[in-house]
Image (cartoon, rainbow, N blue to C red):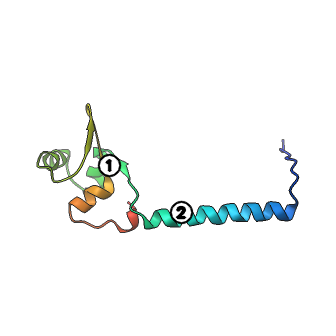
Amino acid sequence: MENIIFSPLSVGDFEKLVTKSVEDALVRIQENQNKNVSEIVDGDYLCNKLNITRQTLACWRKKKLIPFTQVGQVIRYDFNEVIQSLGLTNKGGKR
């Protein structure tokens, strides 16, 4: 069944509203790509991306070579911070 929405907007005004919303969203996406956005990952993801073992990851944590956050038994990493701490590059905050 088709949903019908009644609005006091004309078709032209509605098109302008949608166009403005899409343009604003694209600007926000572009701004986020230019920032170093935090990307919180687990150890398995990090091991896979860096092609290392869990033992190597634990060793790096113990030697304080990489930043991490631990709450109880749960350990997480900011992917971009880890890359920076290892002297690697992560262009545009992307994985």
* Gap between marks 2 and 1 measured at Cα: 24 Å
The local crowd at label 1, few if under 14, some if 14 to 19, many if 20 or more residues have their Cα within 10 Å, is some
User: In the rendered view, does 59 fall on the left or right side of 80?
Assistant: left
* Kind of residue sitting beneath label 1: Tyr
89 relative to 54, above or below: below
The amino acid marked with disc number 2 is Ile
Residue 94 x %, y %:
40, 62
- For the residue pair 8 and 42, the one nearer the viewer reads as 8
* Residue ID at (29%, 51%): 46
For the residue carrying disc 2, how many other residues have a C-alpha within 10 Å: few (<14), some (14-19), or many (20+)?
few
The residue at the point 25 percent across, 32 percent down is: 73
Q: Which quadrant, please, contains the N terminus?
A: top right
Q: What residue is pinned by disc 2?
A: 29
Of the numbered discs 2 and 1, the one sitting upstream in the chain is: 2
Q: Dot 1: what SS?
A: helix
The x and y percentages for residue 43 are: 28, 45
Q: Position of residue 86 (x, y in %)?
A: 20, 61
Q: Position of residue 28 (x, y in %)?
A: 55, 62
Q: Residue at x 65, y 66 (%)?
A: 23
Residue 17 in which image quadrant = bottom right
- Is 66 left or right of 92, judged from the image as shown? left
* Secondary element type, mark 2: helix
Mark 2 or mark 1, whichever is nearer to me: 2
Most foreground residue, 41 or 44: 41
Where on the picture, by quarter, is residue 89?
bottom left
Q: Which residue is mark 1?
A: 45
Q: Tell me whether the residue at label 2 lies in contact with that at label 1, contact meaning CB atoms closer than 8 angstroms.
A: no
Q: Which mark is residue 14?
A: none
Task: Give the side of residue 21 with respect to residue 81, left or right.
Answer: right
Task: Indicate whether 37 appears above or below 1.
Answer: below
